[in-house]
Image (tube, helix red, strand yellow):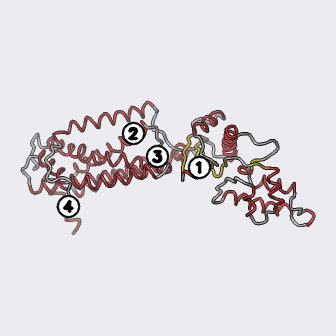
Amino acid sequence: MEFFHEPKIDWMGKKWFFIGISIPLLLAGLISMAVKGGLAYGIDFRGGTLVYVKFATQPNLDEVRVQLERQNLRGETLQQYGPAVEHEVMIGLDLKSTSSEALDAGKHAIIKALAALYGEPPAGKVDFNNASASTVAANLTAADPLHLASKGGDTEKAYRDLADALVSFRNGPPQSGLITDFQQLGAVKGVTPAVVSHLTDNYYLSRYAVFNTEIVGPKVGADLRRQAVYVTLAGLGAMLIYIWYRFELIYGVAAVIATFHDVLITLGIFSLLNKEITLTVIAALLTLVGYSMNDTIVVFDRIRENVRSSKREDILPLVNRSINQTLSRTILTSGLTFLAVLSLYLFGGEVIHGFALVLVVGVIIGTYSSIAIASPVLVFWQQRTSGGLRSAAGISKGASQARKRAERGAA
């Protein structure tokens, strides 16, 4: 399938136009990172605490953020995730300590902020949705709604088991930590109308529940950040060596420069948009590296084929012809990939929002750089090393040597 039949676009004649697009994009991203003191890292990399909260109705994140700041929880991040009907929000706190005391303090501060937003608990009542199993067990043991003390046996153990069952039911699906009616607890084994009546009299049901917490220590975050850089650089280095072996060194250098260009522009856009760099974003960047490199190799492979058959042809029309010959393939594959990642970005939800954004930007920039960055670098190097000569013979010899190395390796 071809979108264009033998196009005659002078790509190399427009190289300064393309460079004029890339330089402002690179500078804008670098300036943004410099002004902001670097990239904005997620909890995965900077360390902190993730608190997962479920709401009975759709929360107003701006109002929640204001209440958290009133509790001195500065630098927090709020992100809605999962299906919209679940009303679940992930709150990231910059708590550097990994102790249980710090975790409890952060959790209680969030509950206090939400209580100020949704209303304080009635006097003398405990919030069942945010109560621990030990709190419920102690309360049931003291009240003894099942009159177990008069029957003998281990009353404390019996109520402890009952409290564990109640909390497990509350935290399990479909409640996910949020009970909206005490009558729902009647489905728990061992719960009688007397127990439900006692809970109704002594507890109340808030419109929110903290149902999970996670801690990432600052040292772990720094290690992950360093490893992410190493992995990205190692991937570029491995691709450079492979392309050097299969093609020629300049092909590999041009491809790595173009890919590095793609990564820098993508990171710059994240800085401009105040988006956080998370583990999923790093995974998307590595995907971008592979995609951009593959698209560049397709163009380079056609250039190499044309060099073999037209060694005396002027290098500029040869490269233009090679790009034009692969243009239909580029538009077809990149266009379909773009539609797929755009769908992920629009409909995939908040959890993969950063991942999809990298791919949306990366498919565009990666396709653009294969034509506008990698190929001009190859032409520039050939002209420089050939003393200004413009023929393809300057890279023909290197390509021939690379082909012989590949044939020996295959043998």
Q: Which of marks 4 and 2 is nearer the N terminus?
A: 2
Q: Which x, y percent locates residue 10?
A: 15, 43
Q: Earlier in the sequence, mark 1 or mark 4?
A: 1
Could you tell me if the residues under marks 1 and 4 are in contact, i.e. CB atoms within 8 Å?
A: no
Of circles 4 and 3, the one toward us is 3
Identify the disc placed on residue 269: 2
Q: In 3D space, how far apart are the residues under numbered discs 1 and 3 (Cα atoms)? A: 34 Å
396 sits to left or right of 129: left
Of circles 4 and 2, the one toward us is 2
Q: Which is nearer the eye, 328 or 198?
A: 198
Instruction: Give the residue at mark 1.
Output: 87
Q: Which x, y percent locates residue 390?
A: 10, 43
Instruction: Give the residue at mark 4.
Output: 405
Residue with the most extreme right position: 150
Which secondary structure lies at badge 1?
A: loop
Q: Which is nearer the eye, 127 or 42?
A: 127
Instruction: Give the residue at mark 3.
Output: 226
In the image, what residue type sits under mark 3? Arg
Q: Earlier in the sequence, mark 3 or mark 2?
A: 3
Q: Which x, y percent locates residue 168?
A: 70, 60
Neighbours of disc 2 within 10 Å: few (<14), some (14-19), many (20+): many
Q: Which is nearer the eye, 221 or 365?
A: 365
In the image, what residue type sits under mark 2? Ile
Which secondary structure lies at badge 3?
A: helix
Neighbours of disc 3 within 10 Å: few (<14), some (14-19), many (20+): few
